[in-house]
Image (cartoon, rainbow, N blue to C red):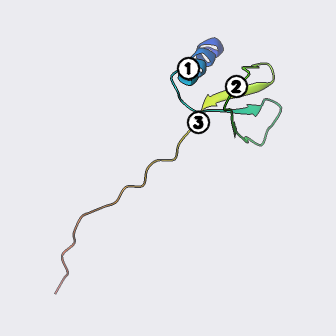
Amino acid sequence: MKTLLEKQIAVMQAFHNGKQIECKLLEDHNDIWIDANNPYWNWHAYDYRVKKHPPKERTNWTIKKKKK
């Protein structure tokens, strides 16, 4: 399990590498994350994470034979 410092470093490195970052107030218990296009890295008031993208929809191209 990562320490808090390791998590913070990983998020900041992801931002440095071009990943999108989200933040939320630590006092916000609704789990509402917003885009942080230019994060201030105020870890005392906010939590930060790498933005989660929904999985891409996959198409099943299997052709089924009709029963007679």
Q: Which quadrant would the N terminus be assigned to in this image?
A: top right
Q: Is residue 56 above or below residue 1?
A: below
Q: Give amino acid for label 1.
A: His
Q: Which quadrant would the C terminus be assigned to in this image?
A: bottom left
Sequence-first tag of 2 and 3: 2
Q: Are marks 2 and 3 in contact (CB under 8 Å)?
A: no
Name the front one of labels 1 and 3.
Answer: 1
As rendered, which of 4 and 33 lies closer to the eye?
Answer: 33
The numbered disc on residue 39 is 2
Q: From the image, tell me which residue sits under label 3.
A: 51
Q: Is residue 67 above or below residue 43?
A: below
Q: Residue 51: x and y, percent?
A: 58, 36
* Element under disc 3: loop
State the CA–CA distance, disc 1 to disc 3. Answer: 14 Å
Q: Residues within 10 Å of mark 1 (few under 14, many from 20)?
A: few
As rendered, which of 35 and 55 lies closer to the eye?
Answer: 35
Q: Give amino acid for label 2.
A: Pro
Q: Are marks 1 and 3 in contact (CB under 8 Å)?
A: no
* Element under disc 2: loop
Q: From the image, tell me which residue sits under label 1.
A: 16
Q: Is residue 13 above or below residue 60?
A: above
